Image (cartoon, coloured by chain):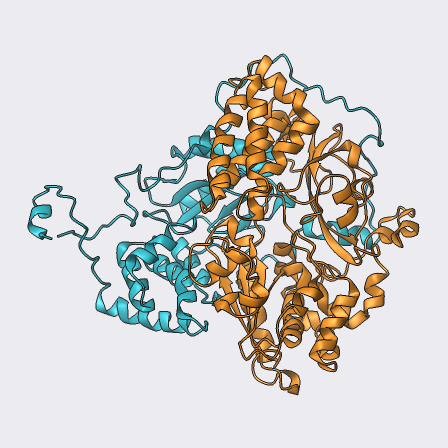
Chain colours: A cyan, B orange
Amino acid sequence: MSATSSSQGVQLGMPQLPAPDYPAEVRARLDADAKEVIARYPDSRSALLPLLHLVQAEEGHVTRTGIRFCAEQLGLTTAEVTAVSTFYTMYRRRPGGDYQVGVCTNTLCAVLGGDAIFDALKQHLGVGNEETTPDGKVTLEHIECNAACDFAPVVMVNWEFFDNQTVESAKRLVDDLRAGRTALPTRGAPLCTYQETARILAGFPDERPGAVEATGGAGHASLAGLRLARGESGPARVGPPRGVPQQDTPPHHDEQPPKRHPSSHDAPQKTSDSDPDFPAGPIAEEGEG
Amino acid sequence: MTVAAAVNETSPEKLLSPVLSAFWDQPESWTLETYRRHDGYQGLRKALAMSPDEVIAYVKDSGLRGRGGAGFPTGMKWQFIPQGDGKPHYLVVNADESEPGTCKDIPLLFANPHSLIEGMLIACYAIRSEHAFIYLRGETVPVLRRLHEAVREARAAGYLGRNVLGSGLDVDITVHAGAGAYICGEETALLDSLEGRRGQPRLRPPFPAVAGLYACPTVVNNVESIASVPAILNRGKEWFRSMGSEKSPGFTLYSLSGHVAGPGQYEAPLGITLRQLLEMSGGMRPGHRLKFWTPGGSSTPMFTDEHLDVPLDYEAVGAAGSMLGTKALQCFDETTCVVRAVTRWTEFYAHESCGKCTPCREGTYWLVQLLRDIEAGKGRMADLDKINDIADNINGKSFCALGDGAASPIFSSLKYFREEYERHITGKGCPFDPAASTVWADDTRTSHPEVHA
């Protein structure tokens, strides 16, 4: 296990050296936070997911230092922590922007406009899936169903809801985020940074005044049934009665098939096996040997 | 069917029954104060006046069935917890709402989190648990804030902590945010995740009721199931049974979404039909007709306009060849390509497969390859039998029910729309225009580009 050979750039298949620790003052602060997180559970290992959120709050993604920190807090190996951190999609394995813009492209949102929004944002921002704008402000990604189908198409920014989006509104949204203008969610609190959001996910309540009550009780779609039950009625219109044969002739039968494969954005992701730039551990900005 | 007489009356006031959603439009609906103004924590007081076993029997007698998809009787789940075993018991609430199309628990918790807290207290009292967990999916931070606040308020008011309301009951609740994994909606995968591991399902038996969280007896219930309990205690099991049918009693949240004029949450007795829901809410979007829909999320076999009159309860939906699931009614009109829809759902299952078992891990991967080819016009007729075969090798052969879910859209779409698959192959491409399916498609034709549906 010679550090000398790797510092000379010769790849000998040696294992990586342990990640460096956090600076002492950071470590002391995180130690106190971790103690509070661990105390919530009868078994310390249950604190691993929140602790991974916590180290993400510190550095913006899960670094090897963060993994070492979690392992030391819980008496686990870094391999055990890495296995968990790479399983869940919310843990970033590389640095990202202050605002994570996630466009839902699961079937319902995709059909209702999510695909068009995602394509437009890729072009507008000049980045691909899971890529960050050069100013470090916006990381674009497509996300799975976020439990807001009655508000489709949905865009999430740092996991706050931006409901009923259009191509134009989504472009305006990312422009505002990049220009530092206020962008208010339709459901959720005024945006904080990705790292500040991660701290809430670690289980530390959002202390900003007004954050809990922002955007009121329920979104408009959530109230649709309640309003009808109170006697406000809408126009009646319904599908064909039972037994009528369906005639689902496509409206644009004579059109050419789309040139671009409609689902090609969702090609299999690189894994640690296929992506030597990003080994199973997150990238290491720390010096290695 | 006790509900039959009522549903002949077609006004929404008669057909709908807001209980959980009854005060979502009130100012600060999420606060303890608003909740108390609407009978909040009255169910708990009634429960505490009974013995724990009486509470279990009462919930069992009410006929409440799990609202997370499987429909297992809630009271029976509680009864399975061995008592006097000397081990800690745990209640874990599954708030990992991730099934495509499902959007009921998140708005419920955003607008009325105290109904869940109160239900959890009643459940903890019944099963003799002193520590309960809410496993919330991490991607919904606005809901996480409200849950943090609701637990804080409940603790400050003496509903949580030591000696709740002077009853001798000690209960604490930990709010736990997940980190993005559909599989954690499966109850044993959720338990592994809550123990700080990769979320992969466990072999059963032992069932969670015997060896769940930390190998201790554990009840895992869906949010809506638990949140329905306080109203049952407060207003009575007879009141609850006066809604729905003998085997599917009570009220529930139906989530209408897609190409409909009035997407949203509709709380109604079990057994309402999609036709009734569409009739009252404005139907499909103007000028379009229903093509296919899911009764309870993407994992429930799809229906067509033939099924508009199927009563949406556990038995009738099952008899019609699907499952009630989460009552996520995703409606698609005639502009939607069913091959595109199924391909996208299958990509989701491939992405979310936890990798533990081969049928699901490999099967969903190959389904995606074949479906993408078919969608792009590069498929062969034999591929249709092949995807059916692969789905058959996942269904019933995978480790958990989530694998079975991946087969549902394949089987059901081939059953109702095989001809549409064939047209992609013979026509060497997709005959549909995706732009026509967007919510703004009809607006732009009439030059109102900014109008949202």
- The residue lying at 45 percent from left, 67 percent from top is A204
Farthest residue toward the front? B205
- The residue lying at 79 percent from left, 39 percent from top is B282
* Image side of residue B74 versus residue B428, left or right: right
Query: In this view of the protein, can residue A217 be seen by the observer?
Result: no
Which percent across, then down, holds residue A183?
A: 49, 49
* Image side of residue B416 versus residue A129, left or right: right
Which percent across, then down, holds residue A33?
A: 37, 70
* Image side of residue A11 versus residue B391, left or right: left
Q: Quadrant of residue A35?
A: bottom left
Which percent across, then down, holds residue A223?
A: 72, 53
Which percent across, then down, holds residue A64?
A: 27, 55
Query: In this view of the protein, can residue B146 be seen by the observer?
Result: yes
Count every numbered label the image shows and give the total: 0
Nearer to us in this view, B80 or B89: B80
* Image side of residue A109 versus residue A45, left or right: right
- The residue lying at 47 percent from left, 59 percent from top is B192
Nearer to us in this view, B274 or B370: B370
Q: Quadrant of residue A201?
A: bottom left
A249 in relation to B294, above or below: above
- The residue lying at 69 percent from left, 28 percent from top is B415
